[in-house]
Amino acid sequence: MKITRQAFLALLAGAARAFGKPRRMAMAIDLTKCWKDRGCTRCAQACHAAHNVPQIPDRRHEIKWIWKERFENAFGEESAGPAVAGAPVPLLCNHCERPACVKVCPTGATWKRESDGLVIMDEHRCIGCRYCMAACPYGSRSFNWSDPRPFLRVIDPAYPTRAKGVVEKCTFCAERLARGGQPACVEVCPPKAMVFGDAADPSSAVAQLLRTRHAFRRKPELGAGPNVFYLL
Amino acid sequence: MSERGIIAAGIALFLAGAGFPFWHNAFAPPRPLVLRLPEAERQCVAPVAYMRASHGGLLLAWRDRVVRGGERVFTAPDGRVRELSLVRTCLGCHEKTEFCDRCHQYVAIAPDCWNCHADPRRPQ
């Protein structure tokens, strides 16, 4: 049987579509639920305990994976009406569709995982150039200016600490997902304001929330395509 | 003439001092490296000869499989499924100070594993 080049390519494209659609892990944070207790920091506490994130008093050296920021600082002055101005918004790595940090990394220490869209960090390969920190428009990355261990009261040996001279950030709890779990922040959130799942699967809880609720993202005009959505 | 004796004695003293590491080791009793083996386990993830020679390479390969490839478990040659983890698999049996450090100190190498990974027995 003779096959034209065009038919072969069409066949190839069909096969590629049929074989495993990649997942696109995303998080939806329901701010109305989050704001029931504006002083709550359980998500940050759980995350930072699970990943040995140090509490460094000097703010220039601070390390953070998930933290709270005033609404107008997260979304811009013009988007903050009187109803939301000053309200705390949980921020974390957005695991962007087109991550700028990945593009600039000279060693391939950070990359976008094809199977589920997580922006993964390999601290073994990080040389500490901090290009990714300059590139990230969300301030999601932190640099270890010194050995973080003196700033950790307890070290959980189940997760490595980092060393002086590497960059770190939220990983959407890749190690917990691999064991079939949920991210630590999602699990611990008292009002269950955070929903995590595969946005490419229309039946997932996160995809349904994004369809039915008013969802918005940080700095959409940059085209990075964040995968952390905020619901109001 | 009397200087010959002083020179000879000086040379002998110098050789004795400079050669101290050699003759001290030559007459020292043999020090067999006895590593305490885990009580609950009889079989490592790979044969002993391979682990002795290549555990560093094995750990680097594990690291790449976990961090870069997203694999978390593997099937050992004895058929058991184990976790690809320095802390949970290796340190699950062996203690860092008694097992890893003894040889590493002897051969004067300092692998940077421990800058980040911690022994669960003494994490601080």
Image: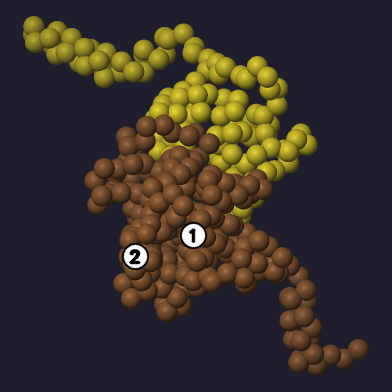
Marks 1 and 2 sit apart, C-alpha to C-alpha, by 14 Å
Which colour represents chain B?
A: yellow
Q: Which chain is brown?
A: A
Residue B67 makes an appearance in the image: no
Q: Label 2, secondary structure: give it.
A: loop
Mark 2 sits on what residue? A85
Residue type beneath disc 2: Ala
Q: Position of residue A68 (x, y in %)?
A: 38, 54
Mark 1 sits on what residue? A32
A223 displayed left or right of B61: left
User: Camera-side residue: A167 or B55?
Assistant: A167
Q: Position of residue A96 (x, y in %)?
A: 50, 68
Q: Residue at x 59, y 57 (%)?
A: A196
Q: Residue at x 43, y 33 (%)?
A: A155
The chain containing the residue under callout 2 comes to A
User: Camera-side residue: A84 or B72?
Assistant: A84
Q: Residue at x 42, y 66 (%)?
A: A101
Q: Position of residue A142 (x, y in %)?
A: 35, 54
Mark 1, residues whose alpha carbon is within 10 Å: few (<14), some, or many (≥20)? few
Q: Label 1, secondary structure: give it.
A: helix
Residue type beneath disc 1: Thr
Residue A230 makes an appearance in the image: yes
User: Camera-side residue: A30 or A167?
Assistant: A30
Q: Is residue B80 above or below residue B5?
A: below
* Quadrant in which the N terminus of chain A is drawn: bottom right
